[in-house]
Amino acid sequence: MANNLLSGLGKFGLGNLQEMKLYEEPEEKKAAAKEGPKVVEETDFLFAKSFDCPVCHVSFTDLSLRSSKARLLGTGDFLRAKYDNIDPYKYGVVSCPECGYTVLSRYFAPLSGAIANLIKTNISQSFIKRTTSPATLSYDDAFERHQLCLANTVVKKAKDSEKADVCLKTSYILRGMAESLNKEDADYADKLKEIEEAEQEFLKNAYDGFSSARTAESYPISGMKEEVLDYLLAALAINFKQFDAASRMISSILTNQTAASSIKEKARDLKEVLLKEKK
């Protein structure tokens, strides 16, 4: 017996119907089949989100990530998450095109009159207004926006944790920038060295700021529980050969009665890295 569902129709003179499909495909599937596989674009993950600036009170839109569409691949060095087809950190700041107020999206909130005046005096008076809105951001665009963000945090006298958070996220931008370089370019080695040196400078300031915040601020710090911040500090300490500090942070995680087993497992892995680095 033939396997085709309608293979017996030939004896009725209806052989032309033997290949008919039993069920019709939805129209969108038919269209997709004709067009071929869809090319994923960065714009597929983005939308224009509306904001009201707490400094100049102008309404504006800025590019924001559709988090439901981004697929997490894993977490790398210094808690840097990696996603398929998109680097979300490029879109991690909100920046007013009118007055220059720029902040990590986590910290976008109403401001006191005194802080708003600091931004107006030190940022807005000299800020060159942006008149165009790109469909996506390059790494150079994202880096400049993070620099502007860092300047805002200093001007508004933000907590050490916020300054450190901006530095950490800027290091992520620089890491992404390095990964996007074309290795075939003649100046690849020079560009890579320059980016890596800048990345280390931002990481060092992140380490200093979070170390200060750990002793002076209440948890969660920049959205991190105690054990998560300790893990980050341990990883940063190893990076800067601060082995005693790294050992203390790892011990803090492993003896933390409320820490999740997953972060303790990561701490044990980090302990192995520490032991190798010390040798």
Image (cartoon, grey):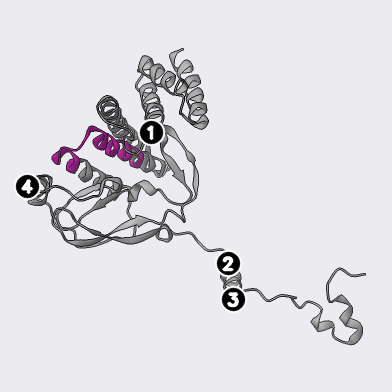
Q: Which residues are magenta?
A: 151-173
Residue under label 1, please give it. 225
Q: Label 4, label 2: how many angstroms apart (C-alpha)? A: 55 Å
Do callouts 1 and 2 mark residues in contact (Cβ within 8 Å)?
A: no
* Local SS, label 1: loop
Label 1: how many residues lie within 10 Å, few (<14), some (14-19) or many (20+)? Answer: few
* Local SS, label 3: helix
Please name the residue shown 12% across and 47% down the image.
119
Q: Which mark is residue 27?
A: 3
Please determine whether, in this image, residue 127 is positioned above or below residue 250: below
Residue under label 2, please give it. 36
Residue 248 image position (x, y, % from top left)? 39, 17
Question: Horizontally, is 91 left or right of 29 in the view?
Answer: left
Return the residue found at the far bottom: 13
Label 4: how many residues lie within 10 Å, few (<14), some (14-19) or many (20+)? Answer: few
4 vs 1, front mark: 1
Residue under label 4, please give it. 121
To which quarter of the image does residue 204 belong? Answer: top left
2 vs 3, front mark: 3
